Image (cartoon, rainbow, N blue to C red):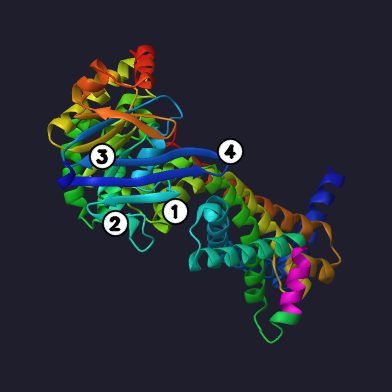
Amino acid sequence: MSTDALIRTEGLKKHFKGGDIQALRGIDAEIGRGEVVVVIGPSGSGKSTFLRCLNLLEMPTAGRILFDGVDITDPKVDIDAHRRKMGMVFQHFNLFPHMTLLGNMTLAPIKLLHESRENAEKRAMALLDRVGLADRAGAYPSQLSGGQKQRIAIVRALCMNPEVMLFDEPTSALDPEMVGEVLDVMKRLAEEGMTMVVVTHEMGFAREVGDRVIFMDEGRIVEQGTPEKIFDSPESERLRSFLAKVL
Amino acid sequence: MERGGFAVDEIVRVFRQCFIADNRWRYLLTGLGNTLTITVFALLLGVAIGVLVSVFRSTYDMTYDTMRPGFGKVMLGIMNRICVLYVTVIRGTPVVVQLLIAYFIVFVSVRSGVGVAALTFGINSGAYVAEIIRGGIMSVDPGQFEAGRSLGFNYVATMRYIIIPQAFKTVLPSLANEFIALLKETSVAGYVGIVDLTKAGDIIRGNTFQAFMPLIAVAAIYLVMVIFFTWLVGKLERRLRTSEH
């Protein structure tokens, strides 16, 4: 796995000035190509900060992030070019409310990849069809349910043909009955071989879909391994008490 | 009936005196033309300046503290200072004084009074528009910004395609207010000898010694323009709202 790491972090630290919070205290992690890594942990453990550092939405205070062998924390690196290869899905969807679904999905491919409108729309329609929303292409985000919004957010990111998808608690803002439809889309994506890093509280998803589970607490990786190892034979006391509360 | 008939005759007589005799209506037409010219150009200039200044100001507010040290950070700091100075000076002095300074000091050799007025009112309006749009930009959900950046848009493109269109929609009513104020503010253009709508009415008053009819006519024309503009903005708002929440 270490020979084919898509993302590698070395000694990643993040310090928030306001409140003087040490969110990350040195994270060394690897995401392999085609691997589905699920990050779990209590609130405030730094798991979202870790994910947001991977595409530099948060600028780490110390450490390096190697993406495809390139240190993207280097100020000379064009971070926008690398972000185009890293799709991101947010807890609160963050769809563009002033555009139709098709507009949401084709904006970046047309403006950044210089695709023709026809081509971009054709690909977007195919993706919409895959998530069962092709008939809503002309609708605006405000007309959708939460689960539909999140499915659109996923395919919007996919329109850029990313090499990795980052999910930041994608189901936490959803009504319970809509969680399944979003997890289904993510599961299909994983089966197709997409590299994924998923921060989530959905332990069922972590166990079923994850290749590897990382348990974080207080800005550190406490334990990691296969879902079986993490969920069935946790080693650390911290993980055991966490699982006792959430399972 | 006799008295009534007399009153109507009198009104017709004064009307003819004020607007028909010596083609005095032409004053109003010229004045209206100048008022509209000044307002439209000032509006365009004001929006251009306002967008530019508001982007510098809000970029500074949102990103300066977390920016990497370097040339960009220094430039942003300087631009922000300039923008703050501009907004402070323009909003802190009366527009009539600005117009007098522009006409008699800065552009003393320029012959076109309307041009100087359009420029002055544009620069003036820009300061107010900047603060309005800045408020709109700051009110857009930060998640929108993150979504744009995570797709690979750079800062400026994120502003252009994602933030500004949403901010603009939020501030449209405030902008409309500003433009209505601008239209009426141009009535001080007469201070530097420009025949705008107000000045035109005043000239007719001076020539005919009739105050009532020319001034009421001027007021009515302003009112009609403002009502028309308000209707137009309302229509635009309704069209934009079809896509929102």
Mainly helix, strand or loop, the magenta region? helix
Between marks 4 and 3 in the image, the one whose residue lies nearer the viewer: 4
Label 4 is found on which chain of the structure? A
Distance from Cα at disc 4 to Cα at disc 3: 30 Å
Residue A25 lies, in percent from the top left, at 43, 39
Residues shaded magenta: B93-104
Distance from Cα at disc 1 to Cα at disc 4: 29 Å
Mark 2 and mark 4 on one chain: yes
A238 vs B196: above or below? above
Mark 1 touching mark 4, by CB under 8 A?
no
Q: Which mark is residue B167?
A: none
The residue tagged 2 is A81
Q: Which mark is residue A165?
A: 3
The residue tagged 4 is A19
Distance from Cα at disc 2 to Cα at disc 4: 32 Å
Mark 3 touching mark 2, by CB under 8 A?
no
The residue tagged 1 is B159
Q: Amino acid at mark 3?
A: Met
Where the N terminus of chain B falls, by quadrant? top right
10 Å crowding of disc 4: few (<14), some (14-19), many (20+):
few
